[in-house]
Image (cartoon, helix red, strand yellow):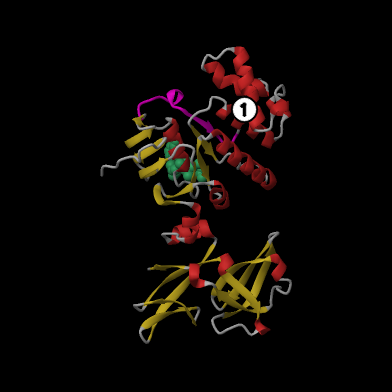
Amino acid sequence: MIRQPVQGSVLSLDNVDKTYSRFAKPALDRVSFDVAPGEFFSILGPSGSGKTTILRTIAGFEKPDRGRVMMAGEDVSHIPPNRRDVRTVFQSYALFPHMTVSENVQYPLRMQGMGKAERLIEAGKALELVEMGSFAVRLPHELSGGQRQRVALARAIVSRPKILLLDEPLGALDLRLRQQMQHTLVSLQKELQMAFVYVTHDQSEALSMSNRVLVMREGRIAQLGKPQDLYFEPKSEFVARFVGNSNMLPIDFVRDGETCVAMIGGVRFPGIVENEPRSGKVAVRYDDVTVDAADDGVGADALDGIVENVLFLGTNLEVNVRCGDLTIMSSIPATQTARLASGQPVRVGFNLSRAQVFHV
Ligand SMILES: Nc1ncnc2c1ncn2[C@@H]1O[C@H](COP(=O)(O)OP(=O)(O)OP(=O)(O)O)[C@@H](O)[C@H]1O
Ligand SMILES: [Mg+2]
């Protein structure tokens, strides 16, 4: 199949196949996408789905078996890594231990033959951008993990590549640092107008930072779209589960006069109807599930259940309710739910206006 890369893209993959050994399943199978200049583009997927292989192919460390890698409209498939306008930040920071912070950041410029005075200025600017300006003379072992990752970032952006590849760069950091670094990355990316191709298996990270997200499954593209599209309109059960924190519940549409109404857990939910009787699964996001005390007398469209667990997650509570043989997860604002405790009988309702039905 011939595919025309989108005009003006800074990066395009065009039907890329990659199999590491002839005994293995393909690591990449017909992968095509385009990245716009200055876009924050994330690749999300479970372990082994091919994320790193995509980055290594873009960087030039892996050669596609078939298909092309294009940069700014030019086929770079045969151009070696050091001549591509790309830098990579890895999960492990890989700084040179015997060089100071400043020398580490100057390194790519030295390789390009830039003079010392200019290098020093450029390294200083890059360190300022990641708020590490006052650490220039330290050695890597004199820094914390988060600081080292900032230095690695400064070293990657110092030569102002058009494309920055980031492979789970925040994976080794604790939650608070990770959130701080997310803010740093987003502002940095806006300021530099570089295209970021950001690999993660953390859906919230991908959704919060990106212009678009590519979801990978076993070497294939499961879905590519804006965060809102993936979240509200997952095209498959896989994407709904992976991206949306969704319950996957069996649903049956049973005839009721002109239309067919939805039954979930033996209860009628007139919120969604179909024309034909059939069965499938419905994805209902945790925050579209309401949990009320059984004596609140809410309407009929609700399942009876017993609270199994209540997890306090700060602003939200995650409540796990057993309704017959279904286990239903709900996320509710912590302020509203002082009365919920495990063992308590409750009524579980659904906001089905945003639910997605998948037929089997
Ligand atoms: N050098 C290699 N030789 C052989 N097989 C490999 C090699 N690198 C990766 N693979 C295989 O290719 C597939 C994709 O691997 P890849 O590293 O791209 O996954 P990933 O999505 O980055 O996973 P993770 O989230 O665990 O980093 C896996 O099945 C993996 O075992
Ligand atoms: Mg990987």
Kindly tell me whether residue 13 is visible in this rendering: yes
Q: Quadrant of the N terminus?
A: top left
Task: Assess whether residue 81 is covered by the magenta stretch.
Answer: yes
114 to the left or right of 218: right
Looking at this view, name the residue that lies furthest to the left.
1
Relative depth, front residue between 232 and 98: 232
Magenta range is 77-92
Vertical order, 288 against 202 (above or below): below
Quarter assignment of residue 260:
bottom left
Say which residue appears at 52% left-offset and 41% top-offset: 198
Task: Assess whether residue 131 is covered by the magenta stretch.
Answer: no
Say which residue appears at 59% left-offset and 74% top-offset: 322
Relative depth, front residue between 332 and 24: 332
Estimate the x, y position of residue 84 in percent, counting from the top left: 43, 26
Say which residue appears at 61% left-offset and 13% top-offset: 116
Question: In terms of secondary structure, where does tag 1 sit?
Answer: helix
Disc 1 within 8 angstroms of ligand 2 (CB): no
142 to the left or right of 21: right
Relative depth, front residue between 50 and 161: 161
Say which residue appears at 52% left-offset and 46% top-offset: 210
Q: Quadrant of the C terminus?
A: bottom left
Of the residues shown, which amino acid type is indicated by label 1?
Ala
Residue labelled with disc 1: 126
